[in-house]
Image (tube, rainbow, N blue to C red):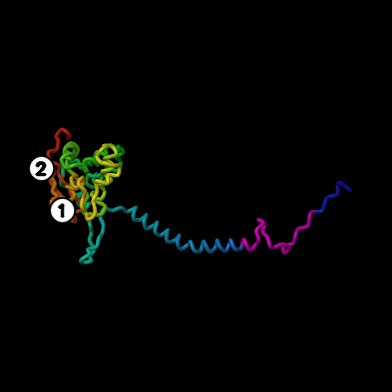
Amino acid sequence: KDPKKKKAPPKKKGVNQDLSKTSTGDPLWVKLVRLAIGVYAVKEALPIAEEFKGMCHQVAKQISHPTIITKGTNRQTGETVIVDDYREAYFWLRDKTPEDARIMAWWDYGYQITGIGNRTTIADGNTWNHEHIALLGRILTGPEKDAHRIARHLADYVLIWAGGGGDDLAKSPHLKRIANSVYRGLCSEPTCRSFSVKRGGVPSKQLSESLLYKLHSNGLVPGVEADTNRWREVFRSKYGKVRIYKILSVSKESK
């Protein structure tokens, strides 16, 4: 044989020689079924994706336009009610309290008190000191007399969110757990279940004796009154969402 003679290239199969398999080795009908399933899945997912997109835009719009003024509906008359209690309370602080007044409230409202009310608050969303937050929780959830002994050295006013919903009373077990995480022994067990509202809206003994409950329910629940020698209510918003008390016998040295 002549070594220089090149071998002829193998003949290619005709297009219609083998239609039963694709380049991957799968039969053609399998590939077609996969394609059909994919098209069906995309078609079914598009409406869900559009709905999710719309929901995301709606939530983003709400979050990007935060407001402390809300709307409600009067169940008896059906009319729309504008609830402006929070702004009303912060403006009261701005206009009716001394410029150097210190406001004690749970840290959730700290920025609002500072930004809208233009007053110093004991804690806000930037308070990183856990012990500081725990002390605030201890005051609010502690017995009224013990709470006053500490509060009079820290603040001039106490602001409470009331009126139901996510108010301070609803958050109170959480406040107690935070306080107990630093000041051990405030609760008999870690979850502080003894500090809660029982069925029928009846507070536990520990909760009923707390400063938070006294200021929250003062004059609203029969038999519940804040000690007028230690606190004086100076503001209550239109729908009772916010109550502000002046702390009496404030320590002058603390100023």
> Which amino acid type is marked by label 1?
Val
The spot of residue 99 in percent (x, y) is 18, 41
> Which amino acid type is marked by label 2?
Asn
- Helix or strand or loop: what does disc 1 sit on? loop
Total labels drawn: 2
At horizontal 49% and vertical 63% (from top left) the residue drawn is 44
Nearer to us of marks 1 and 2 is 1
Residue 106 tag number: none
Separation of disc 1 and disc 2 at Cα?
A: 20 Å
Q: Which residue is mark 2?
A: 229
Q: Most extreme residue toward the bottom, as rendered?
A: 77
The spot of residue 177 in percent (x, y) is 28, 43
Q: Is residue 26 magenta?
A: yes
The spot of residue 70 in percent (x, y) is 26, 57
At horizontal 65% and vertical 56% (from top left) the residue drawn is 24
Q: Quadrant of residue 33?
A: bottom right
Upstream in sequence: badge 1 or badge 2: 1
Residue 35 in the image: above or below residue 243: below
Badge 1 local density, few (<14 within 10 Å), some, or many (20+)?
Answer: few
**Quadrant in the picture for the C terminus:** top left
What type of secondary structure mainly makes up the magenta span?
loop
Q: Quadrant of residue 105?
A: top left
At horizontal 53% and vertical 64% (from top left) the residue drawn is 40
**Start and end of the magenta stretch?**
9-31
Residue 121 in the image: above or below residue 40: above
Q: Which residue is mark 1?
A: 221
Depth check, front residue: 140 or 240: 140
Depth check, front residue: 200 or 119: 200
